[in-house]
């Protein structure tokens, strides 16, 4: 009788043990697959969420304990929910320009860093190229390399913007360019950037200086002017200064963007000017998003790299309140003050704004354009410079996942600047 009982018990325990081993094996397999998916798959968190949801459901089916079933069932619901959210942010939230992966390194062979502020920290501007130290940027989308570009940086931390000129010509009139990645020339070669093409199209009569950098706004321009960075870099008499502006420069100057926290902070004063008040990061983080950004800032670079592969994580990281009229007012004052500094410091110099009015329907764009004109600042709209841009953006962008101007756009904008701004201003 005892033998029969033992045999029946073994018959029951065998399948139970197999189910138990299977339930243990599934999470181990999922962890292994998660590592590979995170490393090699585009939109990895969609697949990771679905993987863990599937594993959780399978464990629910084989689990024998009620509490284990309940635990894994809840885990499955959470995984499905996160996967759906990740899919929404990938396909809908970032529909206009899907997130691409970028990294920066010293050369083509060394591994890169995804955090440009960590790599190029600057005590005044927040971040800036290192003097005399060129670097490489690689951009990928869906695991496909979009471009790998080397940026040549001169001894003053500026991307080269002119063919070689002789010493006599270097001391004559020159051209100053300010702005962000559009002016810096993200994704295009040194000789394809708008400032470089402008210098070429003047037949080398004017040396160009490119003070722009990735993620900059007008607050970096004003800091460069006020704190002597421009004077330290040039050996000439500036004749024309051009600031290439985007609508979201308002949010950057207001410190709303995640990376803008490291930039110089300007506030309005009672006399209608702006005053420098340190950096945005000197303030205590505001609210949940502020705390979230501070947490992200202190993570190791590899952790940042993998977390930023999540579209939902990136959306939360870069989410901020809408800009308001006060933000626009500070922005306009910063640009106007930059114009005043240039015109007072460099006799005869003129200041112009090239503005990317992407939609023509955004009220922020209209307020910026009207505000600049009211301050007497010459504004040149991209809808005039590139009349085919609206509706044919792909012709002028590097890629649908990278909205930066391609070499064609840089060349056409440079052509307009030479013919419409430089030639009339200098009679060249």
Image: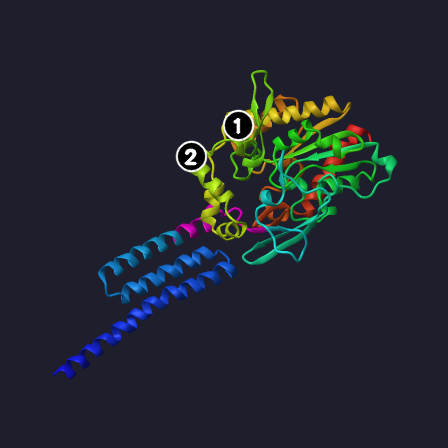
Nearest the viewer among 312 and 92 is 312
Residue at 38% in and 60% down:
52
Q: Is residue 183 visible?
A: yes
On screen, residue 98 versus residue 244, left or right, reads: left
> Crowdedness of circle 2 by 10 Å Cα count: few (<14), some, many (20+)?
few
214 relative position to 65: left or right: right
Picture coordinates of residue 219, whole percent (x, y):
61, 31
Q: Reply above or below: 365 against 65.
A: above
The kind of secondary structure element at disc 2 is: helix
Say left or right for 289 vs 259: left
Q: Report the residue that reaches farthest toward the left.
A: 1
Q: Position of residue 165 (x, y in %)?
A: 84, 40
Q: Nearer the viewer, mark 2 or mark 1?
A: 2
Q: Which quadrant of the figure contains the N terminus?
A: bottom left
Q: Residue under circle 1?
A: 327
Spatial CA distance of label 2 from label 1 is 19 Å
Residue 319 or residue 97, whichever sits in front: 319
Q: Which residue is mark 2?
A: 287
* Mark 1 secondary-structure assignment: helix
Rendered position, 63 above or below 181: below
When the figure is inspected, residue 367 is found, relative to residue 297, above or below; the finding is above
Residue 258 disc label: none
Q: Quadrant of residue 66?
A: bottom left
Q: Which residue lies most toward the top here?
A: 271
* Above or below for 325 versus 391: above
Is 98 within the magenta? yes
Q: Residue at x 47, y 49 (%)?
A: 311
Whether residue 380 is visible: no
Are dots 2 and 1 in contact, CB under 8 Å? no
Residue sitting nearer the eye, 311 or 95 = 311
Segment tinted magenta in the rendering: 84-102
């Amino acid at each position: 009788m005892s033998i029969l009982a033992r045999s029946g018990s073994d018959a029951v325990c065998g399948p139970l043990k197999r189910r138990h081993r299977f339930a243990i094996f599934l999470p181990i397999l999922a962890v292994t697959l998660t590592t590979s998916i995170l490393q090699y798959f585009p939109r990895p968190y969609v697949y990771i969420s679905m993987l863990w949801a599937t594993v959780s459901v399978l464990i629910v089916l084989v689990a024998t304990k009620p509490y284990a079933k309940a635990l894994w069932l809840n885990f499955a619901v959470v995984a499905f929910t996160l996967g759906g959210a990740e899919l929404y942010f990938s396909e809908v939230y970032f529909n206009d320009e899907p997130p691409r992966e970028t990294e920066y390194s010293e050369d083509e062979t060394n591994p890169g860093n995804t955090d440009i502020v960590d790599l190029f920290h600057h005590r005044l501007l927040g971040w800036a190229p290192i003097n005399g130290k060129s670097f490489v940027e690689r951009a990928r989308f869906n695991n496909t390399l979009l471009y790998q570009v080397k940026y040549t940086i001169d001894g003053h931390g500026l991307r080269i913007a002119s063919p070689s000129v002789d010493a006599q010509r270097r001391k004559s009139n020159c051209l100053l360019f300010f702005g962000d990645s559009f002016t810096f020339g993200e994704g295009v070669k040194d000789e394809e950037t708008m400032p470089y093409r402008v210098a070429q199209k003047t037949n080398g009569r004017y040396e160009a200086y490119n003070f722009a950098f990735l993620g900059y706004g007008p607050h970096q321009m004003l800091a460069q002017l006020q704190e002597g960075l421009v004077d330290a870099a040039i050996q000439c008499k500036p004749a024309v200064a051009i600031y290439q502006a985007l609508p979201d420069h308002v949010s950057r100057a207001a410190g709303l963007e995640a990376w803008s926290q490291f930039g110089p902070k300007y506030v309005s004063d009672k006399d209608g000017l702006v005053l420098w008040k340190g950096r945005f990061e000197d303030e205590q983080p505001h609210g949940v998003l502020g705390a979230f950004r501070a947490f992200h800032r202190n993570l190791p670079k590899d952790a940042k790299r993998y977390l930023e592969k999540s579209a939902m994580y990136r959306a939360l990281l870069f989410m901020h309140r809408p800009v308001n009229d006060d933000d626009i007012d500070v922005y306009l004052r910063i640009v106007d003050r930059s114009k005043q500094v240039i015109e007072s410091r460099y006799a005869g110099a003129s200041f112009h704004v090239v503005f990317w009015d992407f939609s023509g329907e955004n009220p922020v764009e209209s307020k910026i354009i009207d505000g600049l004109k009211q301050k007497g600042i010459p504004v040149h709209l991209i809808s005039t410079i590139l009349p085919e841009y609206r509706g044919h953006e792909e012709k002028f962008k590097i890629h649908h996942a990278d909205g930066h101007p391609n070499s064609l756009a840089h060349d056409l904008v440079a052509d307009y600047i030479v013919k419409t701004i430089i030639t009339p201003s200098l009679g060249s």
